[in-house]
Image (cartoon, rainbow, N blue to C red):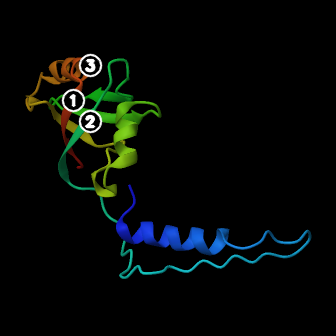
């Protein structure tokens, strides 16, 4: 969904570029784009959050799409995020700084985990639940 400012810019663009006659054959067309009605700057790139909770929703047959390694401390280390999984889908719509990334650790899944030896229980919970509250840390 577009913000009101971007929706206005889109409408202005569509009105200006789509109005009028078609260019004659061979006629050169120059398109000039300028930001209209948008103030402020994008700013510096956002850094990943050190610790956050990601809420990931999954349909019945959708894979999680994550490969993990079990750490002796009980966490799961993210080794790969595959396209087509629900984590990939989550990353495509969440804030940049809250994206789940390779190398981060999953500390808990739906409150399960947090101690050595609980990695198997976290994996089981991640495989069975349709809504996943993942406690993620970057270290």
**N-term-proximal mark, 2 vs 3:** 2
Disc 1: CA contacts within 10 A as few (<14), some (14-19) or many (>=20):
some
Spatial distance from mark 1 to mark 2, Cα to Cα? 6 Å
Disc 2: CA contacts within 10 A as few (<14), some (14-19) or many (>=20):
some
| Contact flag, marks 1 and 2 (Cβ < 8 Å) | yes
* Name of the residue lying farthest toward the right: 26
User: In the visual, does 84 lie left or right of 72?
Assistant: right
Spatial distance from mark 2 to mark 3, Cα to Cα? 12 Å
**Residue 87 in which image quadrant:** top left
Spatial distance from mark 3 to mark 1, Cα to Cα? 10 Å
Q: Is residue 104 above or below residue 13?
A: above
What residue is rendered at 37% in x and 82% in y? 39
What residue is rendered at 35% in x and 81% in y? 40
Q: What residue is shown with label 1? A: 131
| SS label for mark 2 | strand
* Label ID, residue 56: 2
User: In the visual, does 102 lie left or right of 21?
Assistant: left
Q: Nearer the viewer, residue 66 or 25?
A: 25
| SS label for mark 1 | strand
Which quarter of the rendering shows the N terminus?
bottom left
What residue is rendered at 23% in x and 21% in y? 123
Q: Nearer the viewer, residue 22 or 46?
A: 22
* Label ID, residue 127: 3
Q: Position of residue 114 (x, y in %)?
A: 9, 32
């Amino acid at each position: 969904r577009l913000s009101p400012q971007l929706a206005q810019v889109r409408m202005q663009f569509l009105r200006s570029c789509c109005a009028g006659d078609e260019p004659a054959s061979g006629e050169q067309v120059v398109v000039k784009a300028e930001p209209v009605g948008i103030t402020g700057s994008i700013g510096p790139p956002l850094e990943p959050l050190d610790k956050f909770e990601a809420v990931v929703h999954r349909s019945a047959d959708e894979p999680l799409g994550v490969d993990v390694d079990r750490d002796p401390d009980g966490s799961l280390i993210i080794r790969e995020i595959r396209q087509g999984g629900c984590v990939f889908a989550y990353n495509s719509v969440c804030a940049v700084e809250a994206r789940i990334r390779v190398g981060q650790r999953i500390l808990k899944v739906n409150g399960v985990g947090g101690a050595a030896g609980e990695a198997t229980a976290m994996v089981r919970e991640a495989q069975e639940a349709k809504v996943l509250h993942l406690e993620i840390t970057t270290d």
